[in-house]
Image (cartoon, grey):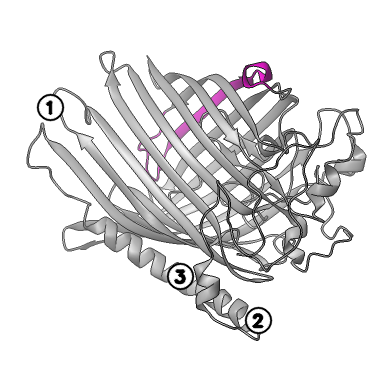
Amino acid sequence: MYPPSPQSPPSRGGEDLNPTCSTDYIKNKHCTRRNLIAKSVGDVNNHFQVKNALRILIPFATVISILITATSAFSQEGKKPSDPNGIDWSIFPFAGASTDIGVSFGAIGSVAKLDKDYTPYRWRGQFEFCMSVKDGDSGVMLPFHYDFVRFDFPDLAGGKLRLFANGMFYLNSIYGYFGMGNNSPVHAVIPSPNPDTQKQHQYYLTQYIAELLGQMKLGKGWHALGVVRLKYNTPSVYDGSALSTDMGQQDPHAGPLVRGVYNHGVIQFGAGMQYNSRDKEEGPNSGMLHELSVRYSPGIFAGTTLDFGGVTADLRFYHPFIKQYLVLAVRLFGDVLFGAPPLEELGYAGAFNTYEMIGGSFGIRGVPLGRFYGKAKAMGSLELRSMFFGFRLWQWKLLLGMVAFVDTGRVWADLQSTPSLDGNGLGLKYGVGGGPRLQVGEAFTIRCDIAYSPNAGDAGGWPIGVYVQIGHMF
């Protein structure tokens, strides 16, 4: 995956930082996949030929992604089960693209037990497998892997209770880290023998997650929410990286600057309220979806000192100016962490639906994933959506449209004022852009977002962000 290097990731306090991935292969008990793609290209004398080829490949993959995903979905959309009390199943491949993780591909499937006495089914199991290929300073690599399994029980307690049981595996060998706070430097001077300069602002993160979520109907659009989540994280640090430097630093308000950069578990409990008045779940044209939640992770239960909690407010508004032809969608998001959270939590937000914030495809589009870390995050997004062309392809109903958007927000390293990490002034980061949408029936929407941000090139890649994924951002 990376060129050979005699260095292994440093340890903290003598602890083993698994996975210890060599820079040529991902090879240990957590990472056994060999970079066959890099070997298959043979002796590439000029790496930039490979790099340029992949830069051409991403726009090409954008088109192919839409075609593969849409064509696969067509085979499922409108399918009617023959037995109202039988088993309904589906599986189809998909492809996507992102400037954060490269060209992704995988499969999505589901199996549901139908029952005429339960709506819409008695239970359903879903799975997703995804991995990606991306160019880097040292060649082609496979940096990302995500596996997801969900069991959904939607009609319990007389239709008032819905339960989800989820299991996830997440691996990202190029997760970004430039430093703590809203003013983390773009080009830190880090003396290192490592020839891969991109790894100076990256680290390796592997997560194993199991969670149980519940949703209880309270009437008139109100729901009570609850979650129990177990996580096991195995971060690994590259020699000479910004993270390896910050691990030895102290926070201006006492204590270590970063915590949890070692193998550790997290037990998390969350509760909240949700209000939903949207006219539909997929591509809503009117209504609201608001969520207020709290979460707490007692470190003593996991045998660590990582004791922390958080509060999240997620407010979403949808207003139709001209039916589906012009819809204003607005999102206001805030998340605050207390206590001693580990590093990976500082790049996430949310108790029930967790999002990578503030950069990435669900944050400020155009800002690289992992660009900014902090205990407090605030973000706003505005989209103008227009679904203007409906047509049928055989028995399938399709809807084509466009979206223009602007995202803005910032982080704070700590709840106390820290100008050395956050700078002075407003400090807002932003991304602007747009892109097409293809809605497949009422099942899902394929989106392609192209975003400009002044921070887009901070990770050494494209000066813009490109994201091809399933589902609206919000």
| Distance between the alpha carbons at the discs numbered 3 and 2 | 19 Å
Residue 415 location (% of width, % of height): 81, 28
Residue at 38% in and 28% down: 164
Labels 2 & 1 near each other (Cβ < 8 A): no
Residue 470 location (% of width, % of height): 42, 52
| Of the pair 123 and 367, the residue shown nearer to us | 123
294 w.r.t. 204: above or below? above
Q: Which residue is mark 3?
A: 61
From the viewer's perspective, tell me whether residue 209 is left or right of residue 190: left
- Dot 1: few (<14), some (14–19), or many (≥20) neighbours within 10 Å? few
Q: Secondary structure at mark 2?
A: helix
Q: Nearer the viewer, mark 3 or mark 2?
A: 2
Mark before the other along the chain sequence, 1 or 3:
3
Residue 343 in which image quadrant = top right
Labels 3 & 2 near each other (Cβ < 8 A): no
Q: Which residue is mark 2?
A: 48
Q: Which residue is mark 1?
A: 116
| Of the pair 184 and 438, the residue shown nearer to us | 184
Residue 4 location (% of width, % of height): 69, 67
**Dot 2 amino acid type:** Phe
**Dot 3 amino acid type:** Ala
Residue 129: within the magenta? no
**Dot 1 amino acid type:** Lys
Q: Nearer the viewer, mark 2 or mark 1?
A: 2
From the viewer's perspective, tell me whether residue 436 is left or right of residue 230: left
| Of the pair 26 and 50, the residue shown nearer to us | 26
Which span is picked out in magenta? Answer: 277-303
Residue at 34% in and 32% down: 151
Mark before the other along the chain sequence, 3 or 2:
2
| Of the pair 57 and 388, the residue shown nearer to us | 57
Residue 300: within the magenta? yes
